[in-house]
Image (spheres, rainbow, N blue to C red):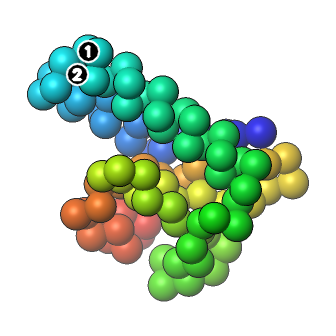
C-alpha cells in the first residue's frame, strides 16, 4: 500500500499545479498518472530505490522523469516522504 506524508502530498499538489499552469491540463493529468504508476511500481519493488543515508538511514530515492521520489519501506508498503525536483538541493528539504 502506498501512503503519502503531508509534505509529499503538498509536494504533489505543487507539482500538479505547476504542470497544469505551465504545460496544460492534459500534460498534468498524464504526469499524475505516470507518478501514480511509479508509486505502485515502487510499492511492489521497493528495492528499486537507492539508499540515501546522507539524508536519512531508512530513506530510499527513485528518479521519475524530473522528480526524485523519497520514500521508506513500512510494514504495509511504502511511505512517500517527499517529491522534489531533481535540481533542488534535497538535503535542505529534510531539515
Question: Residue drawn 19% across and 18% down?
Answer: 24
Is 7 left, or right, of 31 in this rendering?
right
Quarter of the image with the N terminus in it: top right
Badge 2 crowding class, 10 Å Cα cut-off, few under 14, some 14 to 19, many 20 or more, is some
Is 22 left, or right, of 60 in this rendering?
left
**How far across and how far down the image is residue 76, in percent?**
85, 47
In this rendering, the count of numbered labels is: 2
Residue 89 or 94: which is nearer the viewer?
89
Q: In 3D space, how far apart are the residues under numbered discs 1 and 2 (Cα atoms)?
A: 5 Å
Is 73 left, or right, of 42 in this rendering?
right
Give the answer, above or below, for where 58 lies relative to 80: below
Quarter of the image with the C terminus in it: bottom left
Mark 1 or mark 2: name the one nearer the start of the chain: 2
Can residue 5 be seen in this snapshot?
A: no
Q: Which mark is residue 25?
A: 1
Q: Secondary structure at mark 2?
A: helix
Residue bearing mark 2: 20
Give the answer, above or below, for where 12 lies relative to 63: above
Can residue 45 be seen in this snapshot?
A: yes
Give the answer, above or below, for where 91 lies relative to 18: below
**How far across and how far down the image is residue 10, in percent?**
41, 37
Is 62 left, or right, of 3 in this rendering?
left
Choose top left, top right, bottom left or bottom right for residue 53. Answer: bottom right
Q: Secondary structure at mark 1?
A: helix
Q: Are marks 1 and 2 in contact (CB under 8 Å)?
A: yes
Amino acid at each position: 500500500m502506498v501512503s503519502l506524508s503531508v509534505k509529499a502530498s503538498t509536494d504533489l499538489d505543487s507539482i500538479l499545479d505547476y504542470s497544469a499552469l505551465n504545460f496544460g491540463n492534459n500534460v498534468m493529468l498524464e504526469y499524475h498518472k505516470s507518478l501514480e504508476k511509479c508509486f505502485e511500481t515502487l510499492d511492489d519493488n521497493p528495492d528499486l530505490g537507492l539508499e540515501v543515508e546522507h539524508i536519512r538511514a531508512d530513506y530510499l530515492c527513485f528518479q521519475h522523469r524530473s522528480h526524485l521520489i523519497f520514500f521508506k519501506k513500512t510494514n504495509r508498503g511504502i511511505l512517500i516522504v517527499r517529491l522534489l525536483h531533481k535540481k533542488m538541493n534535497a538535503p535542505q528539504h529534510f531539515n
